[in-house]
Image (cartoon, rainbow, N blue to C red):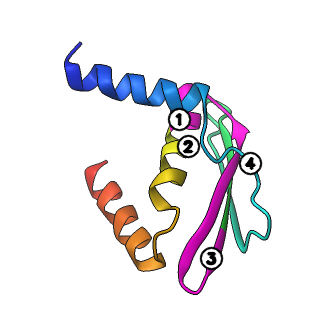
Amino acid sequence: MSGLQELYQDIIMDHNSRPRNFRKPEGATHSSEGYNPLCGDRINLYVRVEDDSITDVGFQGSGCAISKGSASMMTESVKGKSKSATEKLFERFHEMV
């Protein structure tokens, strides 16, 4: 396994075992549910937006290490960002995958 793959795996496993923002934030203004019927992963995402900025974000749910770890990483990536910066991040991610 390459060093980059090992680093990715270590990061995902760390976020899976110690998920960041694994909670429903107070005063969430937006929410969404993701469900994968093929494997049963289910994630509920909660976001609080104030003055065009993501002031808090959290998630709850269950699933595999990749699902839970990536949800944790995503919440860390968008917290404190503006809506437009988050949309650009979303577009870049979709271009990569």
Front residue of 94/73: it is 73
Closer to the chain start, of discs 3 and 1, is: 3
The answer for how far apart the CA atoms under marks 2 and 3 are is 18 Å
Q: What label sits on residue 9 in the rendered view?
A: none
Nearer mark to the viewer, of 1 and 4: 4
Q: Which amino acid type is shown beneath numbered disc 3?
A: Val
The picture quadrant where one finds residue 64 is top right
Q: Mark 1 highlights which residue? A: 69
Marks 3/1 in contact by CB < 8 Å: the verdict is no
Callout 3 secondary element: strand
Q: Which amino acid type is shown beneath numbered disc 2?
A: Ser
- Image side of residue 89 versus residue 41, left or right: left
Write the residue at 34% across / 29% down.
8
Closer to the chain start, of discs 1 and 4, is: 4
Q: Mark 2 highlights which residue? A: 72
When the figure is inspected, residue 93 is found, relative to residue 84, above or below; the finding is above
In the rendered image, the residue lying farthest to the right is: 26
Write the residue at 34% across / 55% down.
93
The picture quadrant where one finds residue 56 is bottom right
Write the residue at 72% across / 74% down.
29
Closer to the chain start, of discs 3 and 4, is: 4
Q: Residues within 10 Å of mark 3 (few under 14, many from 20)?
A: many
Write the residue at 29% across / 61% down.
92
Q: In this picture, which residue range is highlighted in magenta?
A: 48-69
The answer for how far apart the CA atoms under marks 3 and 1 are is 23 Å
Q: Is residue 88 magenta?
A: no
Q: Mark 4 highlights which residue? A: 23
Callout 1 secondary element: helix
Q: Mark 3 highlights which residue? A: 49
Marks 1/2 in contact by CB < 8 Å: the verdict is yes
Q: Is residue 64 magenta?
A: yes
